[in-house]
Amino acid sequence: MKVTIIALAAIFLILTTAFAEEDVHGSSFCDSKCGVRCSKAGRQDRCLKYCGICCEKCNCVPSGTYGNKDECPCYRDMKNSKGNPKCP
């Protein structure tokens, strides 16, 4: 019985650590890419918010501060509720 509880606790810790590391790596990737993408935006807070959302879903951000969306079709094709492009 004790061995089972210890084994389950070890598996839980391993899985939590794996997911935590993935989130940290994804966030730093998106933060740096979106920082470049939104560096010249008039509303940087809004640009960073939506770029971050798109990056987390697509794992991709087009290069440069504007355009180049063909580099990342998922990012390019995301639409908001009004049918307009969601990603900056």
Image: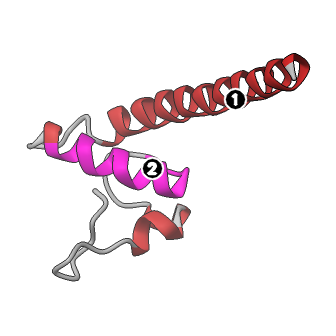
Q: Amino acid at mark 1?
A: Ala
Q: Residue furthest front?
A: 1
The residue under the point 53% across, 51% down is 60
User: Given contact means CB atoms under 8 Å apart, are the residues at marks 2 and 1 in contact?
Assistant: no
Q: Is residue 2 above or below residue 73?
A: above
* Nearest-to-viewer mark from 2 and 1: 1
Question: In this figure, what is the number of numbered marks?
Answer: 2
Stretch in magenta: 46-63
**Which element is circle 2 on?**
helix
Quadrant of the drawing holding the C terminus? bottom left
Q: How is the image coloured?
A: secondary structure
The residue under the point 58% across, 27% down is 20
**Which element is circle 1 on?**
helix
The part of the image, by quadrant, that contains residue 5 is: top right
Badge number at residue 55: 2
Q: Is residue 58 magenta?
A: yes
Describe residue 24's horizontal placement relative to residue 86 as left or right: right
> Of residues 39 and 57, which is closer to you in this image?
57
Expressed as whole percent of the image width and height from the top left, the position of residue 62 reads: 46, 53
The residue under the point 31% across, 54% down is 66
Describe residue 11's horizontal placement relative to residue 18 as left or right: right
Q: Is residue 61 visible?
A: no
Answer few, some or many: residues within 10 Å of disc 2's Cα (few below 14, many 20 plus, some between 14 and 19).
many
**Residue at the disc numbered 1:** 18
Q: Is residue 47 above or below residue 69?
A: above
Quadrant of the drawing holding the N terminus? top right
Badge number at residue 64: none
Describe residue 32's horizontal placement relative to residue 83 as left or right: right
